[in-house]
Image (cartoon, rainbow, N blue to C red):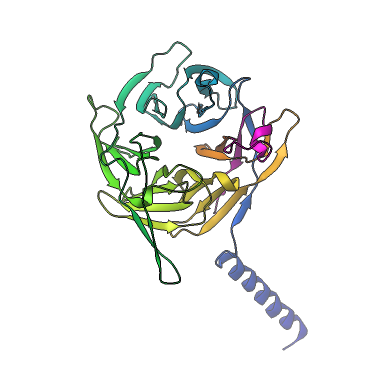
Amino acid sequence: MDRSRRYAVAACLVIAGALEDLQAEPRGPQVIQVEAFAELPVGVRYPEGLAANPQNGEIYVGTFDVREPVSERNNQLLRYSADGRVIAQKLFGPTPLTGLAYAEGYVYILNFGAAKLQRIPAAFDAESPVEDVLSFPALSPPAPAPRTVSNPDGSQDHVRFGSSGTPAPNGLVFARNGDLYVSDSFQGALYHVANALRCSPCELNVIARSPLLATPGSLPFGANGLALNADESRLYVNNAGDGRLLRMTLPDGDVQIVAESLHGADGLLFHDGLLWLVANQADQLLGLDEHGRVRVRSGGFDGLSATGAPLGLLFPASSVIHGDWMVISNLALPLTATEGDEWEEQVTTWNLMRLRLPRHP
């Protein structure tokens, strides 16, 4: 073989190897950086739930202000333009808000403090009326059944959950047919509301009550963020206190564990084949496949800006798709009574971050 032919063969082998590398299984998660998107108005803090209007790109933010005394709270529903300007504020005062969703010209609100599902026109202003859709009751029994945990040494732990019967509506997700699913963080339950866009009165049905939906963890929230997979055959749910991603085959399958060690698994959504999970105690946003493997990772806390706003992610709570971007809320909520042990105590301006969605996760 002459020299020119040897060079040609070698070049072909190099190209073939490069193509194989491109087609091979990824060797680790894709890492994406976040950037600042918008700040909350002065005096408003703790952004939690997010929703977006796909028609005009407006973003809605609900706050989870649980300060004591109650008179200090300033809970609001905020309406942002597509480019991150505040264009409306609706006062909710003492009652903190959790999950939000946009559907057919309305923003649906889980009013955690009032234990209600409410809605308001998407083009709301400060004077727009809020409509009650349904109330969440105390369940009987107040807590799910005990959980048995098998240990490596052959012993077992038996976890019994306490509950005062206080409803805690937290995450919500709409199905394409208008049905709604809601999680209850304190009572360890999942709810279903048929035809939630038009029902009157609306009927609330308990579809799961599992010890996997409750928690004895230091973060006192069990069932949290919800997401439906592409064909809506499975409902995924985060357990924040246990740091787990769970799933339930609809309409009445058992709750099962998909992934663990997801510290503070909070907000959840399904997009482009990935489950986007906000790990609030890890200051991260993770994109997991349906087997539970992390495919994308973003975030980390990088300090405070000159205005006292988080750089990166600090106790992030929710995310929402916004065109080619994903917007994330920095809840930045201090959890402990001890002073000086959390960066969240130093935050003076609360903000929203964003990242550009990967084309090929």
The quarter of the picture where the C terminus appears is bottom right
Residue 123 placement, left or right of 25 = left
Q: Is residue 23 above or below residue 189?
A: below
Residue 25 lies in the magenta-colored region: no
Residue under the point 45% across and 18% down: 123
- Name the spot of residue 26 as percent of width and height, x first: 57, 63
- Name the spot of residue 80 as percent of width and height, x first: 54, 24
Residue 39 placement, left or right of 240 = right
Q: Is residue 73 above or below residue 1?
A: above
Name of the residue lying farthest toward the bottom = 1
- Name the spot of residue 351 as percent of width and height, x first: 62, 31
Residue under the point 39% across and 35% down: 168
Displayed quadrant of residue 157: bottom left
Q: Is residue 216 above or below residue 310?
A: below
* Viewer-nearest residue: 25 or 276: 276
- Name the spot of residue 236 as percent of width and height, x first: 39, 49
The quarter of the picture where the N terminus appears is bottom right
Residue 343 lies in the magenta-colored region: yes
- The answer to whether residue 53 is visible is no
* Viewer-nearest residue: 297 or 97: 97
Q: Which residues are magenta?
A: 334-361
- The answer to whether residue 339 is visible is yes
